Amino acid sequence: GQNIDQPTEMTATEGAIVQINCTYQTSGFNGLFWYQQHAGEAPTFLSYNVLDGLEEKGRFSSFLSRSKGYSYLLLKELQMKDSASYLCAVLDSNYQLIWGAGTKLIIKP
Amino acid sequence: ETGVTQTPRHLVMGMTNKKSLKCEQHLGHNAMYWYKQSAKKPLELMFVYSLEERVENNSVPSRFSPECPNSSHLFLHLHTLQPEDSALYLCASSALRTNTEAFFGQGTRLTVV
């Protein structure tokens, strides 16, 4: 079956760095997405990786290793507003998005 | 504001009621989706429409019935739901059904009593 694994919850301190991991086993691969979802709000797009390596976008970076079936989302200089759930999703060979359950990130002052 | 609007935001319905959820996008996207989001579970894709044609139906019970009258509007008709259907229902759209980012609506929080 198809599977996306990410930690259920993480806690970090304001101003610090946190890395949220995502491992996947899917039938084919056409890219990996990260979305941010604040409580009670819509998920919003953060990043898309289809080639191996690191993609940097401001305070957020996303890394992909296709051979390892692994990605991470790196958040730097954490702010209180970064408290949210972070969803990892993989586009399989049928262009269907397979979603992880999300990682709830709690930022403490 | 993501450009995708869902109504209502909250809905409480009895198991014998019939109701409809509405989704609207004016982003010029060709694909629209219905997802179910339950607490601590992955997003479950329910239906996909591409160019107003249904292309995915992931074994969703027939008490959920989608309708896509045009490329900007998507409905989810509900009837004789069960308490376990209580969840957040999210609509999304994307330019293409392939590797483009999806824009989500705020969702409808559905409670079946």
Image (spheres, grey):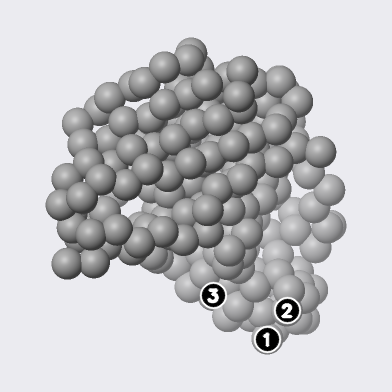
Vertical placement of A50 versus A75: above or below?
Answer: above
Which label is found at residue B39? none
- Could you say where residue B25 lies in the image, as x and y percent from the top left? 43, 40
Q: Would you name the residue on which mark 3 appears?
A: B11
Q: Residue at x 48, y 24 (%)?
A: A64
Question: Do the numbered discs 1 and 3 sit on residues whose CB atoms are within 8 Å?
Answer: no
Q: Residues within 10 Å of mark 1 (few under 14, many from 20)?
A: some
SS state under label 1: loop
For disc 1, the chain is: B
Give yes or no for contact between labels 2 and 3 (Cβ–Cβ under 8 Å). no
Is B24 placed left or right of A16 in the picture?
right
Q: Is residue B16 above or below residue A51?
A: below
Query: SS of the residue at dot 2?
Result: helix
Tell me whether marks 2 and 1 sit on the same chain: yes
Circle 2/circle 1 CB separation < 8 Å: yes
* Residue under label 1: B113
Is B3 left, or right, of A48 in this rendering? left
Q: Nearer the viewer, residue B100 or A14?
A: A14
Q: Residues within 10 Å of mark 2 (few under 14, many from 20)?
A: some
Q: Which residue is mark 2?
A: B83
Q: Nearer the viewer, residue A34 or B99?
A: A34
Q: Amino acid at mark 1?
A: Val
The N terminus of chain A: image quadrant: top right
Gap in angstroms between the C-alphas marked 1 and 3 = 11 Å
